[in-house]
Image (tube, rainbow, N blue to C red):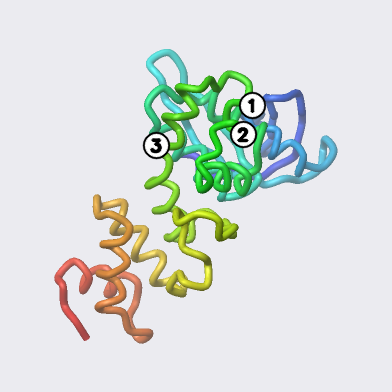
């Protein structure tokens, strides 16, 4: 898998970017939120990527921030939402605006997005509520709650994880554990003297320090 591309911006033609990486041009589709943050052509850029594999194609999508990439990948899990619609959502709304719309159950804001009808908006509100809470609580999406709803835990209430703790949690989630469960497992065994591998090992063994 390709996690990011670092090279020169050879072409900008929404929704397509061409990134020249050592003489190889990678075609990347990106939301307008990413285009707005890019410099002029021929400038060095770093683009976070997500490879989307279909039966008839392998597509590469690019994002300026990790929050954008995480939201895109989370949207793809919603029934009826494909890559094109996910790009449209990120082009029409910032990550913070989308999270706010879900937190407030603002179906009107979502139906303003081209291609999103009432039924799709209702599905987004229902299916994204728990998914967004999980990624926000895990620190994968940066979102400042407005305090008008009960969906997201304000950032101050989220336990502070250092890089080793977060990496251990990510590894456990990749192994199939739910994010809240992974966080508890890591917190129960974590010690600053332990390496990442040792934290993961003890978490899986349920060994408390």
Q: Which residue is more in the foreground, 97 or 75?
A: 97
Q: Mark 3 points at which residue?
A: 126
Q: Which residue: 68% across, 25% down?
A: 16
N-terminal-most mark, 2 or 3: 2
Q: Label 2: few (<14), some or many (≥20) within 10 Å?
A: some
> Mark on residue 109?
2
Q: Quadrant of residue 29?
A: top right
Rendered location of residue 146, percent (x, y): 59, 58
Which part of the image, by quadrant, shows the C terminus? bottom left
Q: Name the residue under label 1.
A: 112
Q: Are marks 2 and 3 in contact (CB under 8 Å)?
A: no
Q: Which residue: 52% across, 72% down?
A: 156
Task: Determine the CA span between mark 2 and mark 1.
Answer: 5 Å
Q: Which residue: 28% across, 63% down?
A: 182
Q: Which residue: 56% across, 60% down?
A: 147
> Mark on residue 64?
none
Rendered location of residue 45, percent (x, y): 72, 45
Q: Is residue 78 above or below residue 115?
A: below
């Amino acid at each position: 898998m390709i996690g990011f591309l670092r090279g020169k911006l050879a072409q900008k033609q929404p929704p397509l970017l061409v990134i020249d990486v050592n003489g190889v041009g990678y075609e990347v589709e990106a939301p307008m939120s990413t285009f707005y943050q890019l410099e002029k052509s021929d400038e060095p850029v770093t683009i976070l990527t997500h490879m989307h594999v279909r039966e008839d194609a392998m597509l590469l999508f690019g994002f300026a921030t990790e929050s954008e990439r995480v939201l895109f990948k989370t949207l793809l899990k919603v029934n009826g939402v494909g890559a094109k619609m996910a790009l449209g959502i990120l082009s029409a709304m910032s990550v913070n605006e989308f999270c706010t719309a879900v937190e407030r159950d603002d179906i009107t804001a979502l139906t303003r997005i081209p291609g999103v009808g009432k039924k799709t908006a209702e599905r987004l509100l229902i299916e994204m509520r728990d998914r967004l809470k999980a990624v926000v609580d895990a620190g994968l999406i940066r979102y400042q709650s407005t305090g008008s709803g009960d969906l997201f835990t304000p950032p101050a209430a989220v336990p502070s994880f250092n890089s080793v703790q977060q990496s251990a949690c990510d590894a456990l989630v990749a192994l199939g554990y739910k994010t809240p469960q992974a966080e508890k497992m890591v917190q129960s065994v974590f010690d600053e003297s332990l390496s990442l591998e040792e934290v993961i090992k003890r978490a899986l063994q349920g060994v408390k320090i």
